[in-house]
Amino acid sequence: MRHIILTLILFSINSGYSQVNGLEMFDESYVHEIRVTFEQENYWDSLEYYYEQYLEFGADKQYMMASVSIDGTVVDSVGVREKGYFSNWGSEGLKEPLKIDFNEYVSGTKYDGLKKINLQNGFSDPTIMRDALAYKFMRDAGVAAPRSSYAKVYLNDTYWGLYLVVEQVDDRFLKNWYENDNGNIFKCIDNTSLEWQGSIKTNYEDEFGLKTNEELDNWDSFIDLVGKINDEDEFEDSISTALQMNSYLRVLAADVLMYNWDSYYEHGRNFYIYYDSVASTFQWIPWDYNLAFSTSETNIVITYDGGMTETKPLVENVMNSEVYREQYFNHLCVFIDNYFTLENLESYIDDTKALIAEPLEDDPNKYFSISQFNTNVNTNITVVDGWGFETVIPGLKSFISSRYATVSSQLDSYSHSCTALSIDEVTEEVNSTSLVYPNPSNTGVFNIVFANAVQQVSVYNIYGQAMLTEAVSELGQTELDLSAYADGIYIVELVGETRELVRVVKQ
């Protein structure tokens, strides 16, 4: 089943839009230093109190004013608060996750072009790498995922610990990934199944929050999406008009591959959806992977058989759709052969381990020992929680190796052959009589006018692996949307009365 991989990689795997903000903050080549200074001596009691009021009584999230110095650059009058859910109340320690809002008190204030940053505490993760590794893998594969870096965090000159700095999903994030950054971001704020609850927005506000364009408060597109997610009879035909399905299927494949159970497909949480008002479709944005890499034996076909996990209609309809399930399988194929491999990820793991070992050893509030950190980078460890229960935490490297074998075997068991063009077809000079414009495309959207009748369009990456397959609904022409994919060269296969191969370039 192993694909033939070309030794010459002809395209960049990074995002198609220039990242004009956060280049310093998310430089992973060194450990940053963040110093937060509060005027109050009892700042920690206040941070804890405000978080408890929010968690237990539903109070508004309250920031405390502080000044912050990041690698020597001082920003005054910023907002700081505790954040998170289980990583906060379940951590039983002082190293709580934090959020810094640079313009909470002074509108328009930014650091390195950023409005907010998140400081993740690494709770439940002996390697403190799971979030960073997950995002790195997904970005490599062209998924719009947050950036990250590490920082030694000081509160009033006391070293509080080593944190992972994670990019905020906001309009600054959109600017880096999408041509249009003015649409609505909806954040999942509580467990959700995305079941239909009627056409009134208040029915969904306990599960989702609108994070941009709040004054307009327009939920029409969101409600339309939920309706199409729950339309079992017309799901295949209607869902692609509301949700960029390749964007979603790649995140679903990544979640299942890493067994990120604390996500939509199982737990019903930890994601954003962005409505691109120009493309008139939603993009699915992943979030929070500190509990990923938890077992390598899970099934790639997701079923809801009356257990504790509530049925998720979007996932269930994907699994029941022959077309979308095959596309989902193909994303798994591409991942395990190119991106979710030790060949791709091991150097990042080793470099990160070397980078953070010393500041983590000095961390007075770390949740695991340095011995556990060193071991868990490679292999499993067993930990005992406060109630005396033992938990096995898989090693990062051993998980990646084991998961490849499991997923490969399961794909075979479902009679899925990971399709690929031959080397000759990928590398040959492609001469097509069909018209493609614009080509190259800055947006990733191509118009194809057929020279002959075409019933099906398939797209392959430069490795020859199938990325998507779509039936042609219009006679004589079609629009091909590769906006959710990385920049680079793709081969488009047009199948009908004849078979043509067209080379397109997204830049």
Image: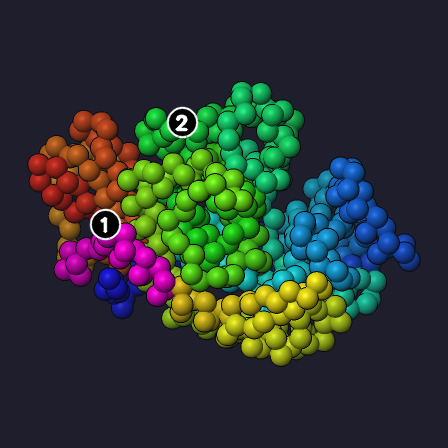
Identity of the residue drawn at 73% across and 40% down: 107
SS category of the residue bearing label 2: loop
- Single out the residue that lies furthest toward the right: 41
Q: What element carries label 1?
A: strand
Quadrant position of residue 13: bottom left
Q: Where is residue 33 in the image (x, y as percent from the top left)?
A: 70, 66
Q: Distance between the residues labelled 2 and 1?
A: 33 Å
Q: In which quarter of the image is the N terminus?
A: bottom left
Q: In this view, does 400 lie above or below 274?
A: below
371, 451: nearer the viewer: 371
User: Which residue is under mark 2?
Assistant: 231
Q: Which amino acid does label 2 sit on?
A: Asp
Residue 400 in the image, given as x and y percentages of width and height? 43, 66
Q: Residue 443 carries which label?
A: none
Q: Position of residue 444 (x, y in %)?
A: 35, 42
The answer to whether 192 appears left or right of 10 in the picture is right
Residue occupying the point 82% across, 58% down: 37
- Whichever of labels 2 and 1 marks the residue nearer the N terminus, that label is 2
- For the record, the magenta segment spans 404-425
Residue beneath label 1, please?
491
In the image, is residue 319 above or below residue 253? Answer: above
Judge whether residue 421 is colored magenta: yes
